[in-house]
Image (cartoon, grey):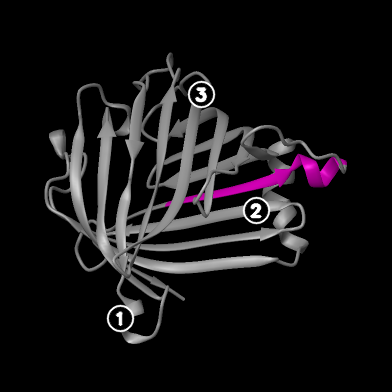
């Protein structure tokens, strides 16, 4: 019920703020043991975030190798509802500026997952935003006849803008740690996936600050796709255009 509420809530709201961007990434050393992925890959990403009176929403869609055979798609939608706004009481303490009901829906080619838990919006010096979400996680895979146990996941995301000798940079990214999805016909190993990025504001050089950024996203994956021993460390060239 709570997840249904999270998924349906954004249908009738006016956003207080929103941000939309498209990204282009390219890397050449992805883990493809057993043919689970492509060694070289171009990824096109559409990303959107917004906030409204009762919470915030985040969505992205990855399309891998859009101009080649074997194109793959993966998306996540992560709505959150502010308990402070819903109750009229400030559920804030220390560095936590709000407490939220957090959900995520993941959908890929033959895989999907549903996550529900609690989120914390953090107030950290110099950060534009920082969040911690703690979820219960249930995965389903079309190739596996028996689902795994419900596990857990911790997700962090952040944005830290900063200047160096007049140049505008951004250090941003995410970190996911999932565990406990045992049982079933194909158990999922605990895994970590993270994508820290260092970007420079290229648009600032031509009078369009915040529009075009370029840099590197470092994809870090331990037990990729929940497969024991499949690890990945890939620097990806990245362009990000904010609409």
Q: Helix, strand or loop at disc 1?
A: helix
Marking on residue 56? 2
CB within 8 Å, label 2 to label 3: no
Estimate the x, y position of residue 214 in percent, counting from the top left: 27, 67
- Which sits in the foreground, 45 or 70? 45
Task: Tell me if residue 130 can be seen.
Answer: yes
- The residue under the point 61% across, 36% down is 95
Reading the image, the residue beneath label 1 is 205
- Which sits in the foreground, 57 or 189? 57
- The residue under the point 43% across, 52% down is 160
> How many numbered markers are drawn?
3
The earlier-in-sequence mark between 1 and 3 is 3
Which range of residues does the magenta coloring cover?
75-87
- The residue under the point 26% across, 44% down is 219
Marking on residue 168? none
Gap in Å between the C-alphas at discs 1 and 3? 44 Å
Q: Is residue 134 magenta?
A: no
Dot 1, crowdedness within 10 Å: few (<14), some or many (≥20)? Answer: few
Magenta stretch, main secondary structure, is strand
Reading the image, the residue beneath label 3 is 152
CB within 8 Å, label 1 to label 2: no
């Amino acid at each position: 019920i709570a997840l249904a509420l999270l998924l349906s809530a954004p249908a009738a709201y006016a956003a207080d703020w929103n941000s939309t961007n498209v990204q282009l990434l390219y890397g050449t050393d992805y883990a493809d043991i057993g043919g689970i992925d492509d060694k070289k890959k171009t990824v096109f990403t559409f990303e959107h975030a917004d906030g409204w009176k009762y919470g915030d929403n985040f969505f992205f869609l990855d399309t891998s190798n859009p101009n080649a055979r074997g194109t793959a798609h993966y998306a996540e939608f992560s709505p959150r509802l502010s308990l402070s706004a819903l109750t009229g009481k400030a559920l804030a303490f220390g560095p936590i500026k709000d407490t939220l009901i957090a959900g995520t829906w993941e959908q890929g080619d033959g895989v999907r997952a549903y996550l529900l838990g609690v989120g914390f919006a953090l107030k950290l010096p110099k950060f534009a935003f920082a969040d911690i979400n703690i979820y219960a996680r249930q995965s389903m895979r079309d190739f596996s006849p028996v689902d795994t146990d419900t596990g857990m996941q911790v997700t962090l995301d952040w944005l830290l803008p900063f200047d160096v000798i007049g140049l505008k940079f951004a250090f941003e990214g995410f970190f996911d740690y999932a565990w406990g999805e045992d049982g079933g016909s194909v158990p999922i190993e605990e895994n970590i996936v993270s994508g820290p990025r260092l970007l420079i504001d290229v648009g600032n050089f031509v009078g369009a600050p915040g529009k075009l950024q370029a840099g590197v996203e470092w994809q870090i994956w331990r037990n990729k796709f929940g497969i024991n021993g499949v690890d990945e460390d890939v620097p990806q060239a990245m362009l990000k255009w904010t609409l």
